[in-house]
Each structure stands twice: as C-alpha cells, then as structure tokens.
Amino acid sequence: MIQAILVFNNHGKPRLVRFYQRFPEEIQQQIVRETFHLVLKRDDNICNFLEGGSLIGGSDYKLIYRHYATLYFVFCVDSSESELGILDLIQVFVETLDKCFENVCELDLIFHMDKVHYILQEVVMGGMVLETNMNEIVAQIEAQNRLEKSEGQGLG
C-alpha cells in the first residue's frame, strides 16, 4: 500500500504532499524534511529505492523516487508494493501531468493544485493504485473539464 506521495523541489519546498496514513501535521513536516534529506544526498546514478526514514516506518517501508528537472517525486510504500511497479506509476503520473499541462513545470503544481490533486486521485486513492493507463486517466480529466465548462456556461 502507498503510505505517502511527496513532490518537492531541489530546495526541499513541498509542492504536493499526500498522506494515506494519519500523522499529526508536525510529524508530516518532519517526514517531508527527512525524506528530502535522504533523497537529496543520493547520487543520480544510484538506484531509486531506499529504506523509509525513521519517522515513516524504517525498514518496513521503502522510498521510491524519480528526479525530473527541478522536482523529486517520492512514493513511500510498504513491502507489499513492487518497486518497479511504483517507478512505472511515477512515470505515468508525470506523463499525465505533462499531457494535461503541456510541459508541466513546478509553477503548474503551485498554481493548479486542485487539478494536480484531481489527477492524483485518478491514479491513486486511499493508498491503492486505481489506474495506470495514461489514456484512460487523461480521458477522465478531459470529461471533468468539459463538465466544468458546461456548468460554468449554465451559470452565466
């Protein structure tokens, strides 16, 4: 099961934080900091899997991450998840963001937080993977966009 999804920039500023396990906000902030420091100190040519930090469960959990341009996408998962499957899921999530925002960048995550969370909910909900087919995810997002436009026109 996925315990948390964290996206932060090269300076450790969180851009997307989603926990699927209940933690007090102070602990969540410590987890983000600890995860950033664990991932940042790793070289780019090293494996993208590492043991979870002490706050999120230690060796029972794994941090699986990818570094794209200025953003780190980190999934914290328990031992029941496949590392390669999660790496593929990160790739699907990033490609979906890229398709929806046409060359996604850090500013898209900041200024369109609601849309980013909606895309994430199409991929993962409650810590469980819902969809891995990018075309299906994009189709659902386009349907949502059409619905929002039609509701907006009905109000005016």
Image (tube, helix red, strand yellow):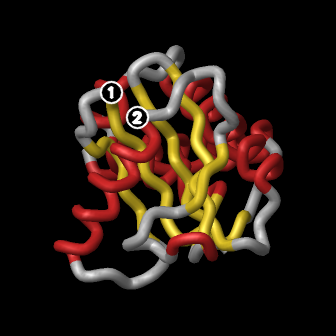
Disc 1 designates what residue? Answer: 10
Please tell me whether mark 1 sits on a helix, a strand or a loop: loop
Q: Residue at x 27, y 52 (%)?
A: 33
Q: Decide if residue 108 is on the left or right side of residue 3.
A: left
Image point 63% across, 34% down: which residue? Answer: 96
Near mark 1 (Cα within 10 A), the count class, few <14, some 14-19 or many ≥20, is: some
Where is residue 132 shown, x and y percent of the image? 79, 50
Q: Mark 1 to mark 2: distance in Å?
A: 8 Å
Q: Nearer the viewer, residue 111 or 106?
A: 106
Q: Amino acid at mark 2?
A: Leu
- Helix, strand or loop at disc 2? helix
Left or right: residue 21 versus residue 8 is right
Above/below status of 121 relative to 10:
below
> In the depicted view, which residue is nearer to us: 4 or 152?
4
Residues under numbered marks 1 and 2 in contact, where contact means CB atoms less than 8 Å apart: yes
Quarter of the rendering containing residue 27 = bottom left
- In percent of the image, x 35 and y 39: which residue is there? 8
Identify the residue at horizontal 78%, vertical 45% (top origin).
136
* Dot 1 or dot 2, earlier in sequence: 1
Side (left or right) of 88 relative to 104: right
* Three-letter code, disc 1: Asn
The percent coordinates of residue 60 (x first, y second) are 63, 76
Image location of residue 76, percent across then percent down: 55, 61
Q: Nearer the viewer, residue 7 or 78?
A: 78
114 vs 106: above or below: below
The residue that disc 2 covers is 40
